[in-house]
Image: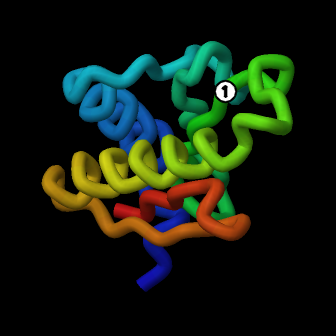
């Protein structure tokens, strides 16, 4: 069954609401400003969830700390989405979570 073509806008709204209810800042657009989440529907993959801090705020000396924080945030996102019953995969070396149902 191809779940990526399921009702994308409805799934996107649901994912946005679940993440907001869990305390995340969900950005209104694809960009991830100030450590917020970018959430959008990709018709070929599903609902994409990505987190990041602006590049200007990531000096090279803090890349290890940033990677550790990214890992913690990704785990939290996976936990919230899985607890809500969603199917989740990773894309782009774990930089994106893809919600398909």
Q: Nearer the viewer, residue 14 or 90?
A: 90
Q: In the displayed structure, does residue 48 sit left or right of residue 10?
A: right
Q: In the displayed structure, does residue 88 sit left or right of residue 58?
A: left
The correct choice, above or below, for 58 with respect to 77 in the image is above
Residue 25 sits in quarter: top left
Residue 98 visible, this angle:
yes
Give the number of marks: 1
* Residue 67 percent coordinates (x, y): 61, 50
Instruction: List the residue tagged with mark 1.
Output: 53
* Residue at the image position 78 percent from the left and 36 percent from the top: 61
* Residue at the image position 54 percent from the left and 46 percent from the top: 70
Q: Nearer the viewer, residue 69 or 88?
A: 69
Type of colouring: rainbow
* Residue at the image position 33 percent from the left and 68 percent from the top: 87
Residue 58 sits in quarter: top right
The correct choice, above or below, for 85 with respect to 20 in the image is below
* Residue 12 percent coordinates (x, y): 44, 39
Residue 40 visible, this angle:
no
Pick the quarter of the image with the N terminus.
bottom left
């Amino acid at each position: 069954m191809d779940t990526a073509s399921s009702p994308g806008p409805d799934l996107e709204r649901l994912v946005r609401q679940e993440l907001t209810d869990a305390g995340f800042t969900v950005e209104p657009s694809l960009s991830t400003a100030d450590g917020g989440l970018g959430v959008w529907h990709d018709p070929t993959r599903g609902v994409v969830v990505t987190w990041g801090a602006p590049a200007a705020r990531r000096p090279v000396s803090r890349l290890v700390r940033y990677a550790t924080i990214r890992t913690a945030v990704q785990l939290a996102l996976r936990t919230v989405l899985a607890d809500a019953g969603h199917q989740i995969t990773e894309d782009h070396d774990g930089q994106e979570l893809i919600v398909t149902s």
